[in-house]
Amino acid sequence: MKQIATFIVNEKRYELAIEPHMLLVEVLRDELGLTGTKQSCGIGNCGACTVLIDGKPVLSCLTLALTVEGKHITTIEALAQGTALHPIQKAFVEHGAIQCGFCTPGMILSAKALLDKNLNPTDREVKYALSGNLCRCTGYVKIIDAVLAAAEAMSKEANT
Amino acid sequence: MKRFEYLAPKMVEEALKMLSDCGHGGAVLAGGTDLLIAMKRREVNPHYVVNIKSIPDLDYIQYHQEAGLRIGAITNHSAIGDSPVIRDKFDLLATACNKIGTPQVRNMGTIGGNICKAGPSQDTPPALLVLDARVKLVSLSGKRIVPIDEFFVGPFKTVLQGAELLTEIQIPNPPPVSAGCYKWATKTVAVDETLVGVAVLITLDSADGVCTDIKIALGSVAPTPMRARKAEEVLRGKRIDDRLIKQAAQVAAGETRPRSRADYRRRISRLLVSEAIAETWKKIR
């Protein structure tokens, strides 16, 4: 039985007809066409499906869509402003932190959640914040470099 | 997943009525990090999913000078791990909650869900055991308070009845001059199932005095999380020293009943109990 539910995604409101079994990741990708969020393991291990809800990283593959009605959902599509990349995205590009790109949206959102709270993370804090996001390609070093560089860039911007 | 009906009660009474009406066809949804996986694998196929995360009254951390800590069942592990009062006065519980899963899992998973899952290798039960936690269980016929060491009866088995909800975790203030810690062993550094978990709470009669009480609990070394009561006897009422720590650790390892990798788990239990007691004792002094 479908029910009408209101979703707030990247600050836009959508009224959708949703069945109880629909997962948030399916609604974002299939109903809203926001395919930046990826499905990979489907059981909460890889973090590719990470989105932010009220600023906190959660796994959209283990979230029934109806349970997040009315909450503020942020997907990777929220970060760039037109063609202007978010500092974290820019740092990922500049530091070679993207190979196949599949882990990237989730990785960047987890990094964003960290930097929104702490603009001066230690190496260890970055690793801890990204510990729920697996990358098969890069070996993580450049991802961590990118996050630390983004932190510095965002710090500078905050102080000017 | 098989198709189901979704129910989102706003109050505990409403949820209890729904669960009672659903009978065996109902499942309680909190964080979803366990239930959704089981449903995807069709291990669990409820006709009704009752979302209790929609009950605002169940998400809280309250501290009272006299009564101690009260935590609502749907409080997330990340909230507990970040809570200033828990980090200050019950820090081993914050440590245990911060160990669970990944940041995403900690933002979704709830302490009530964790306790009710009753997995033998979980991190919160050993901490809750040494803190003498109690859980409040409510049903349409009333409520009962169950000490945490009576709650777990087997792997993934608890005393929770069909239409009963765990609503609150109650933790008394440890006596003055107490400290505790939670330590664990895993294969990988950041994220992994706990192979051996050890929680310790020590109470002294003064900063460098006699150990008036000690509680040692272990996870992932028995069908349920367990207290090492014989090991506790080694130190209770004595002045702690390295020889007694070594002895207690040995006794604790002997009390474990691990199923898989038994020899490894016994050895690591001995090591971790020894480290946990030493570290806690240092904290108090």
Image (cartoon, coloured by chain):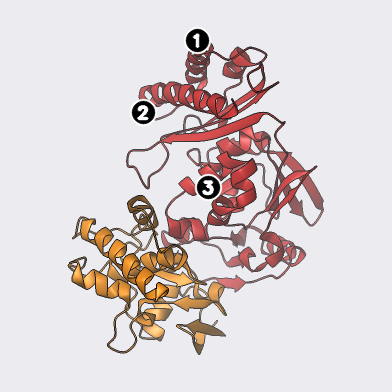
Chain colours: A orange, B red
Q: In this view, does A64 lie to the left or right of B185?
A: right
Can you say whether B199 is above or below B167 in the image? above
Question: Residue A154 location in percent, x, y?
Answer: 36, 71
Q: Mark 1 points at which residue?
A: B243
Q: Mark 3 points at which residue?
A: B97
* Residue B62 falls left or right of residue B219: right
SS type, badge 3:
helix
Look at 29% across and 58% down and name the residue there: A134
Query: Of A95 and B215, which appears nearest the observer?
Result: A95
Marks 2, 1: nearer the viewer: 1
Direction from residue A41 to residue B133 in the image, left or right: right
Kind of residue indicated by mark 1: Arg
Work out whether A95 lies above or below B224.
Answer: below
Q: Position of residue A31 (x, y in %)?
A: 41, 85
Q: Tell me which residue sits at (53%, 24%) in the image.
A: B277
Q: In what element is the residue under mark 2?
A: loop
Q: From the image, tell me which residue sits under label 2.
A: B261
> From the viewer's perspective, is residue A31 above or below residue B109?
below
* Nearest-to-viewer mark from 3 and 1: 1
Q: Do labels 2 and 1 share a chain?
A: yes
Type of the residue with mark 2: Arg
The amino acid type of the residue labelled 3 equals Cys
Q: Mark 1 lies on which chain?
A: B
* Residue B144 position by quadrant: top right
Please state the chain letter of the residue tagged with numbered disc 2 in the rendered image. B
